[in-house]
Structure formats: C-alpha cells, structure tokens
Amino acid sequence: MRVALLHPGAMGASLGAALVASGQEVLWLSEGRSESTRRRAEAAGLTAAATLHDLLAASDAVISVCPPHAAMDVATSVAGAGFRGWYLDANAIAPATARTLAEVVGPTFIDGGIIGPPAHRPGTTRLYVSGDGAADVQSWFGDGALGVHVVPGPPGAASALKMCYAAYTKGTSALLLAIRALAEAEGISGSLLEEWAHSQPDLTARSEGAARGTAGKAWRFVGEMEEIAATFEARGLPDGFHLAAAEIYERMRALKDDPAADLPRVLSALLEPRSE
Ligand SMILES: NC(=O)c1ccc[n+]([C@@H]2O[C@H](COP(=O)([O-])OP(=O)(O)OC[C@H]3O[C@@H](n4cnc5c(N)ncnc54)[C@H](OP(=O)(O)O)[C@@H]3O)[C@@H](O)[C@H]2O)c1
C-alpha cells in the first residue's frame, strides 16, 4: 500500500515511520514545507513527491496530520484534485468539522483523532478511528508503535473522543497558566504557592510543566481550543471555558518552537499589555 502523509510534523512523521515499519511505502509533499519537516520526513524513511498531483497519483490512501486550523484546506485540496482513495483525517477537530470534511471528501472519508505523544514506542499513543473503512486502518499500521482503536459510530465519533480528552488536558493547562498569571499580576504568587504546598501539593509542578509543555505548541492549540468550544456549543453546553483557553494560547503564540520557553516567559507573554 502507498500512503500520502500530509504533513510530517512531530506527530505525522512518527505515524509515517510506523507505516514504513509495517511495510507500507509513505510519500510526503515537499512543496511549501519547511526544512524541519524535510528533516523529519527523511529521518522517518518517507519518499518526497514534488507536487500534489504526483503525490496523489502514486497513493492509495491519504492521512492528514496537520494543525487543526488547516484540516479543511488540506481536505479540500485533495478532494479538488480528484483523489478517490481512502482519506483519513487524524486532526484535533470538532465532530461537526469532521462531518463537513466527510461531505467534502465523500464515502472514502475516515474520521480519526490521536491521543498521546508522537508514536515512537509501543503503548504510548493511540489513533482512534470511526466511520466506514475504520476497521481496516489497523492493518495499515500492523502491530507497531501506534495502537489503532475503532470508536463505534459514524464519522465524528473519533473526533468527539479527541475533543473530550483534550478539553481536559489542554483546558486545565490553560486554566493553571491563567491562574499563575493572575497571581503574578496581583503580587501574591509566593502566598499562592505556599497555600498550594499545604492543600494542593501537585499544582505548582503542574503549572510549571504546563508552561514548558504548551509554550512551543500554543500557536496550533488556538485552533484546537476553538474546535473544542464549537463541540460544546453544538450540544448546548457552555463554550466559554475553551474560548478563554484559546485566548490564553493566542497570547503565547510568539513562543512557537522556543526551546527555552518556561513559566516566567509564559507569564510575561500572558501579562504583556495589549493594544485592543
Ligand atoms: N504532537 C503531539 O504530541 C500530538 C498529540 C496528539 C495529536 N496531535 C495532532 O497531530 C496534528 C499535528 O501535530 P504535529 O505534532 O505533527 O504538529 P507539528 O509538529 O507542528 O507539525 C505540523 C506539520 O504541518 C505542517 N503545517 C504547518 N502549517 C500548515 C498549514 N497551514 N497547512 C498545512 N500544513 C501545515 C508543518 O509544516 P512546516 O514545517 O512547513 O510548518 C508540519 O509538517 C494536530 O492535529 C494535533 O492535534 C499531535
């Protein structure tokens, strides 16, 4: 089987390497991508295609693993090029967005959501899939580093699971960072940390870990938080938690890929005076 991977980011490249290890040929599109994506693709053993036409002509299936805000553009360009093979969207998008993608792509659409870090070791990372064709995805990856699990239901079910999971993990990280920024602005950080040491002993380390773990990726969490907010809103639940989380991550956007970003840098970004 030949699989087109759009695009080999940190997660995408690990899926590509898992497919290669399972015996598939994996192609990627070099057009428009950065040097870091090229390095990751080469390290994962992927084959470059120069144009979308070349890529799709040589592929039986497409897997989309990109920033959530780009998922629709990627699907539209693949469908617009007349591709009729399997199309697996593995991005953090709302179930309603997944259903819209299913209309754009057609009956070969498979909905997916990934939970865990880039899949370099067995047991760490799961790809959840739903819809027609979902049951076949496990055979693409074999018994390698990525666990594949079917979520019963139509396209949108796997994305709903991803939204519920990330609503807690990335939502609580944003909340903790907002609280640390507020304490700093009020001049009571020391007292808050003392109280936490008595009554909530894990929160100091969790807030520091949240800063280190989210700063470099906050630019793409903005779209993910908006997708989560839309998921709550579509079911009549309040969307405000994750719209606020989107704003927290938006304020951290400039820390993209900054290896030295830590809690003090994050607090400065959150508290920087704004013009609007
Ligand atoms: N990383 C994780 O731990 C993790 C965990 C669970 C789920 N996921 C999911 O995996 C997806 C991607 O994550 P990742 O870790 O691979 O991200 P990443 O390391 O930031 O890589 C993003 C990839 O998408 C490309 N890209 C950037 N902007 C784009 C755009 N506007 N249109 C199309 N492609 C674009 C990048 O290319 P350039 O190099 O040219 O910018 C890069 O190849 C997300 O949907 C995320 O929710 C990731």
Image (tube, grey):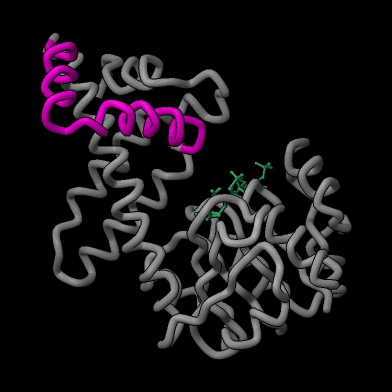
Across and down, in percent, residue 91 comes to: 52, 61
Residue occupying image coordinates x 37% and y 34%:
210
Q: Is residue 129 above or below residue 28?
A: below
Between residues 14 and 38, which one lies in front from this camera angle? 14
Label the magenta part by its dominant secondary structure: helix
Query: Seen in the image, is 145 located left or right of residue 257?
Result: right
**Residue at image coords 28%, 30%:** 177
Q: Position of residue 43 (x, y in %)?
A: 83, 46
Residue 100 location, quadrant: bottom left
Report how many numbered discs are placed on residues in the image: 0
Q: Quadrant of the N terminus?
A: bottom right
Q: Is residue 220 left or right of residue 210?
A: right
* Image: 241 above or below 99: above
**Horizontal and vertical percent for residue 80?**
66, 73
Q: Nearer the viewer, residue 59 or 46?
A: 46
Quadrant of image for the C terminus: top left
Image-quadrant location for residue 136: bottom right
- From which residue to which does the magenta span run? 188-217
Q: On the picture, is 173 further left or further right than 158?
A: left
Q: Residue at x 17, y 22 (%)?
A: 182
Q: Is residue 19 left or right of residue 88?
A: right
| Residue 20 among those drawn in magenta | no
Towards the viewer: 198 or 30: 198
| Residue 5 picture location, percent across and down | 72, 62
- Give the vertical position of 138 relative to 209 (above or below): below
Please give the name of the residue rendered at 85% of the width and 74% of the height, measured from the top-left corner.
Answer: 57
Q: Is residue 211 magenta?
A: yes
